[in-house]
Image (cartoon, rainbow, N blue to C red):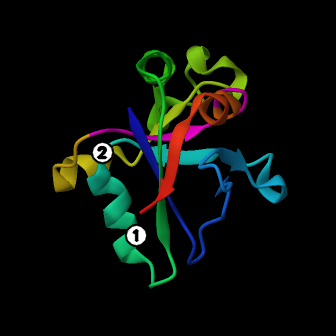
Amino acid sequence: ITYRRVQGSGSKDILLIDKDNNLYINPRWKKSQLNVSTGKDHSQYFKNLRNGDSYIIEFDVPKWLDDFINEYAIPQGTYRKNILNQGGMAPKIVDRTVFLKNGFEGVAYEIPAPIKDWLIEYSQNARIK
């Protein structure tokens, strides 16, 4: 499953790619939550809202990890009061209105640790679009 993140132009450069196309976390932003999405429309939409030095990082994750994130994700509006948020460690579904308004496919997430670390560990084929 392909995940995407828009970076640059005011968005933290949380993700970096080494010369072998491996993804890793920028040490400067190690404690930050990671906002990512599936479906290319959402990332392109936010890239277009920024100026020319923004870019999209794409990377692939195994289906089992995407299934795990989907299973435990909680909508942003009910996140704080939902007892299933695992003390803030469950993935948060964000930007739902943007998806509905524009007919985008996929989901946008705010991913906390340790799931953020698993995304990096199991990612493959990282690239800049």
Residue 110 part of the magenta-drawn span:
yes
Tell me the residue that label 2 is attached to.
39
Q: Residue at x 41, y 20 (%)?
A: 63
Vertical relation: 56 (above or below) 4: below
Q: Residue at x 30, y 45 (%)?
A: 39
Q: Which mark is residue 109?
A: none
Vertical relation: 46 (above or below) 105: below
Tell me the residue that label 1 is attached to.
47
Magenta residues span 106-115
What amino acid type should be assigned to the residue bearing mark 2?
Gly
What element does badge 2 sit on?
loop
One can see residue 98 in this view? no
User: Contact (CB < 8 A) between labels 2 and 1?
Assistant: no
As drawn, is 115 to the left or to the right of 35? right
How far across and down, in percent of the image, does residue 103 sit?
16, 49
Packing grade of label 1 (10 A; few <14, some 14-19, many >=20) is: many
Residue 52 part of the magenta-drawn span:
no
Q: Earlier in the sequence, mark 2 or mark 1?
A: 2
Q: Residue at x 29, y 39 (%)?
A: 106
Quarter of the picture holding the N terminus: top left
Q: Residue at x 40, y 69 (%)?
A: 47
What amino acid type should be assigned to the residue bearing mark 1?
Lys
How far across and down, in percent of the image, does residue 100 sit?
21, 47
One can see residue 120 in this view? yes
In this view, which residue lies farthest toward the right?
Answer: 27
What element does badge 1 sit on?
helix
